[in-house]
Amino acid sequence: MQMVILCGGLATRLGDLAKDIPKSMIQIKGKPFLEYQIENIKKHQIKDIVLCVGHLFEQIEKYFGNGKKFGVNIKYSYDRDKPLGPIGAVKKAESLLKDIFFIMYGDSYLNVNFQNVYSYFTQYKKLGLMVVYKNFDKYDKSNLIVKNSMVVSYGEKKRTPDMTYIDYGTSVLRKKTLDLIPKNTFFSTGPFFSNLIFKKELLAFEAKERFYHIGNLEALREFRNFIENQ
């Protein structure tokens, strides 16, 4: 199994805390957040990792290198001076990707069995799968409608009472989905997943345990507490 971690965001909601470091390198108990992510997915036998990096990427590359000292294999794809957005960054990494791969947001820590997710996905011929969580706006704004094991609506602009699920922070994609994305163009998750939904190609896999993230200061405090209480 292969994991693409999207580490290129600017972390504007974290203010000065991420002014001089990438969000992935924020320290929690003496280790950067990305190290916790890698340790977690490694438990599920994911050791082939592609890091899509941008802002201050040198710090990530210097610390993690090729991943050998962490027991994984890391390759890098660089946004450089042109931000491409999360899906545009995946497109740029296309030459490094296997026929089926995970993507995970660079600020997410997820309590899901990735092997079970992968096995479920490979039973079907769909182009993509999103791990979802029945959130009811608890940990962030819910942004999905799920029906009959399919994601049928994505986004927060047109909120309805049945929008109770949230994007958990990881998805599985077939490489052919990248044919839907233009090269060297900023491309966000909304249009990408909405296109898969329109084509009826986005499966849903429901996670039962809550997710953690460090996308804002309150969420970062929650994750710190989670780690300190381990």
Image (cartoon, rainbow, N blue to C red):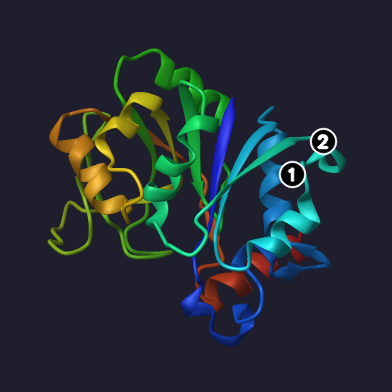
Helix, strand or loop at mark 2: loop
Horizontal arrangement in the rendering, residue 192 relative to residue 162 (left or right): right
Q: Is residue 112 visible?
A: no
Horizontal arrangement in the rendering, residue 15 relative to residue 202 (left or right): right
Q: Position of residue 171 (x, y in %)?
A: 42, 38
Residue at point 84% right, 67% down?
A: 30
Quadrant for residue 150, please give it: top left
Residue at point 26% right, 44% down?
A: 192
Horizontal arrangement in the rendering, residue 162 relative to residue 103 (left or right): left
Which quadrant, please, contains the N terminus? top right
Helix, strand or loop at mark 1: helix
Q: Please name which of the two marks, 2 or 1, marks the residue nearer to the observer.
A: 2
Q: Position of residue 127 (x, y in %)?
A: 31, 25
The answer to whether the residues at label 2 and label 1 have Cβ atoms under 8 Å apart is no
Residue denoted by label 1: 39
Q: Position of residue 76 (x, y in %)?
A: 62, 45
Which quadrant, please, contains the C terminus? bottom right
| Disc number for residue 75 | none
Residue denoted by label 2: 71
What amino acid does circle 2 point to?
Gly
Q: Is residue 116 visible?
A: yes
- Crowd band around label 2 with a 10 angstrom C-alpha radius: few (<14), some (14–19), many (20+): few
Horizontal arrangement in the rendering, residue 113 relative to residue 28 (left or right): left
